[in-house]
């Protein structure tokens, strides 16, 4: 597992309550999720100077990294990535976002 923060020219801090709008704006192109989009996490320090991880998604084709600001950083890379996956899954189920192309 590669947990290094990849190069991105465009950074966005996204409050969790704005995640659906940010996903639709940054990861969806012409009604489809950019196939290069990656769910990841970035290392951060919390208010007590302790290391943690924030969920993030990266769109390499546009060199964009969106870091999702949750109430507290997660304890591990995998935990942060899983949190984002679950949030996006719930939003897709309710119809707020597109996660994959629907077969006609």
Image (spheres, rainbow, N blue to C red):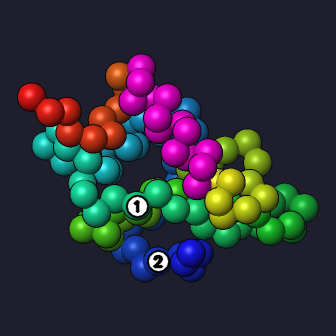
Main SS of the magenta part reads: helix
Q: Nearer the viewer, residue 35 or 69?
A: 35
Q: What residue is rendered at 26% in x and 47% in y? A: 33
- The span picked out in magenta is 81-94
In-image side of 82 versus 75 (left or right): left
Q: What residue is rendered at 87% in x and 68% in y? A: 49
Query: Where's residue 43, x and y in %?
Result: 67, 69
**Vertical comparison of 39 with 49: above or below:** above
Q: Nearer the viewer, residue 51 or 90?
A: 90
Q: Quadrant of the C terminus?
A: top left
Q: Residue furthest top?
A: 94
Magenta span has 92? yes
Q: Element type at marker 2?
A: loop
Bin the neighbour count of mark 1 within 10 Å (Cα to Cα): few under 14, some 14-19, many 20 and up: some
In-image side of 81 versus 46 (left or right): left
| Mark 1 or mark 2, whichever is nearer to me | 1
> Residue 36 sits in which quadrant?
bottom left
The residue to which callout 2 is attached is: 6
Bin the neighbour count of mark 2 within 10 Å (Cα to Cα): few under 14, some 14-19, many 20 and up: few
The residue to which callout 1 is attached is: 38
Residue 12: tell me if it is visible: no
Q: Earlier in the sequence, mark 1 or mark 2?
A: 2
Query: Where's residue 92, x and y in %?
Result: 39, 30
Query: Where's residue 99, x and y in %?
Result: 33, 40
Number of marks in picture: 2
Q: Nearer the viewer, residue 40 or 9?
A: 40
Q: What residue is rendered at 40% in x and 61% in y? A: 38
Q: Residue furthest right?
A: 48
Magenta span has 1? no
**Vertical comparison of 11 with 17: above or below:** below
């Amino acid at each position: 597992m590669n947990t290094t923060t990849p190069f991105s020219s465009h950074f966005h801090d996204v409050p969790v309550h704005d995640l659906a709008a940010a996903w639709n704006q940054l990861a969806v192109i012409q009604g489809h999720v950019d196939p290069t989009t990656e769910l990841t996490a970035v290392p951060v320090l919390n208010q007590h100077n302790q290391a943690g991880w924030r969920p993030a998604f990266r769109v390499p084709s546009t060199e964009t990294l969106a870091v999702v600001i949750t109430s507290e950083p997660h304890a591990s890379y995998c935990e942060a990535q899983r949190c984002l996956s679950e949030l996006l899954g719930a939003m897709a189920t309710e119809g707020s976002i597109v996660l994959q192309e629907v077969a006609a």
